[in-house]
Image: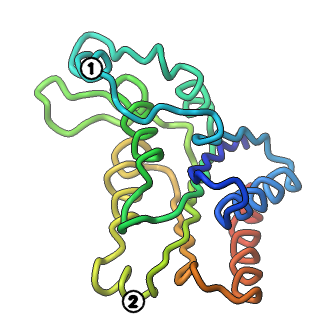
């Protein structure tokens, strides 16, 4: 498959980047065609511009500034997102990628009556989010009810690529990890991505 791996972490030698590299190596070893977008490394500008916002409900969204990112998204059959969860949400860089790239006419179409949107990411068959959190699992799952997972599964993929299978791999208490826990999580990533055909 054509796999798009989007990495959103500002620190070059971070755990997230090491996990991203493991995911890329696993996909490549299984014969997938992998495109990597390192949002921080590429200097992606996350803020939606006035021109882009002004064209949201116009005849066509003005996506000229993000055209290479749009092309990669539209070509993807599988999507891997690697990022830290900060304050139980996306890093601003990744949120901006959704704001500017998952736009009308690209990821979805507006309904003529401004009702439910119509999906456009029909090629996307698989998606997985790989994230690290400083909190323990029970805070994310029991107290906050996995807000990042719900947004990805329901709001983004559920409306723009409803046929896409989604998985979430969360590494909790990431600020004080023993090596065996990192290895176990790497193994989970490997098992998950090895199942993609």
Residue 115: x percent and y percent? 14, 36
Q: Secondary structure at mark 1?
A: helix
Q: Residue 181's quadrant in the figure?
A: bottom right
In this rendering, is residue 161 above or below 103? below
- Residue drawn at the location 69% of the way across and 44% of the way down: 3
Res. 9 in view: yes
How far across and how far down the image is residue 54, in percent? 23, 17
Question: 42 or 23: which is nearer to us?
Answer: 42
> Of callouts 1 and 2, which one flags the residue occurring earlier in the amino acid sequence?
1
Q: Residue at x 25, y 36 (%)?
A: 117
Cα separation, mark 1 vs mark 2, equals 40 Å
Residue at numbered disc 2: 138
Q: Which residue is found at the position 77% from the left and 57% from the top?
A: 21
Q: Position of residue 136 (x, y in %)?
A: 45, 87
Residue 5: which disc? none
> What is the quadrant of the N terminus in the image?
top right
Q: Quadrant of the C terminus?
A: bottom right
- Residue most extreme to the left: 113
Residue 72 falls in which quadrant of the image? top right
Q: Provide the residue designation for mark 1.
A: 50
Does residue 99 appear to the left or right of 178 in the view shown?
left
């Amino acid at each position: 498959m054509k796999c798009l791996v989007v990495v959103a972490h500002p620190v070059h030698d971070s755990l997230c980047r090491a996990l991203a590299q493991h995911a890329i190596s696993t996909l490549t070893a299984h014969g997938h065609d992998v495109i990597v977008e390192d949002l921080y490394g590429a200097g992606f500008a996350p803020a939606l511009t006035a021109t882009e916002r002004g064209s949201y409900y116009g005849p066509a969204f003005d996506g000229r500034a993000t055209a290479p990112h749009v092309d990669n998204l539209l070509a993807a059959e599988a999507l891997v997102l690697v990022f830290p969860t900060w304050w139980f949400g996306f890093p601003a860089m990744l949120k901006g990628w959704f704001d500017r790239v998952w736009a009308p006419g690209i990821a979805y179409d507006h309904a003529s009556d401004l009702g439910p949107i119509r999906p456009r990411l029909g090629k996307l068959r698989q998606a997985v989010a790989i994230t690290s959190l400083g909190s323990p699992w029970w805070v994310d799952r029991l107290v906050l009810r996995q807000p990042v997972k719900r947004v990805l599964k329901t709001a983004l993929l559920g409306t723009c690529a409803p046929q896409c299978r989604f998985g979430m791999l969360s590494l909790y208490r990431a600020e004080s990890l023993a090596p065996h826990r990192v290895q176990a999580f790497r193994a989970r990533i490997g098992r998950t991505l090895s199942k993609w055909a």
